[in-house]
Amino acid sequence: MPWVLLLRWVVRLAAGLFFWRLVTARRNAYAPGAPPVRGRAAARRINPRAAALAIREGVSLGWRAITVVTLLVLASLLVDAGVSLVVLSPRWLGATLLGLAVVALVALYLESLWLYRAVAARRRRRHDELLRREV
């Protein structure tokens, strides 16, 4: 199998993931909301800003989940190919793939940590919203 093509594919995939991660990064996406207004607020049922933030949050969490799964698959493939090549044939190529696997595992760890924090923040925010509605 032409290893150059395989490496080129892996590098393109990683570069694409990195590019989209930078493009879709959130900065202060959720500002603390104003307290609920009584009276005329009942006439307006859907807050467009809240709906947009909910859609953006769902897309962001989905993107992070897809990134975690992709990095997991990439790391497992790199470990498998690296170990096979270290044992069977060109050891330098196997060592290179194992080095790339370590980089992918570090990226997987960081991305899964960010996903966990985002899900925890979403849970806290929804819990706070439920408490505000009860008051």
Image (cartoon, rainbow, N blue to C red):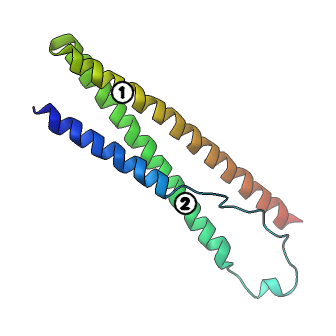
Q: Amino acid at mark 2?
A: Gly
Q: Residue at x 76, y 88 (%)?
A: 43
Q: Which quadrant of the structure image shows residue 127?
A: bottom right
Q: CA distance from mark 1 to mark 2?
A: 29 Å
Left or right? Give the position of 53 relative to 38: left
Q: Residues within 10 Å of mark 1 (few under 14, many from 20)?
A: many
The residue tagged with tag 1: helix, strand or loop? helix
Farthest residue, direction top? 87
Left or right? Give the position of 44 relative to 14: right
Q: Answer whether residue 84 is visible to the viewer in this image.
A: no
* Vertical comparison of 7 with 92: above or below: below
Q: Residue at x 21, y 11 (%)?
A: 87
Q: Position of residue 107 (x, y in %)?
A: 47, 35
**Quarter of the image where the N terminus is located:** top left
Q: Amino acid at mark 1?
A: Ala
- Residue 71, disc: none
Left or right? Give the position of 34 relative to 96: right
- Residue 101, disc: 1
**Quarter of the image where the C terminus is located:** bottom right
Q: Position of residue 113 (x, y in %)?
A: 58, 37
**Which residue is at the front of the view, 46 or 63?**
63
Q: Which quadrant of the structure image shows residue 92?
A: top left
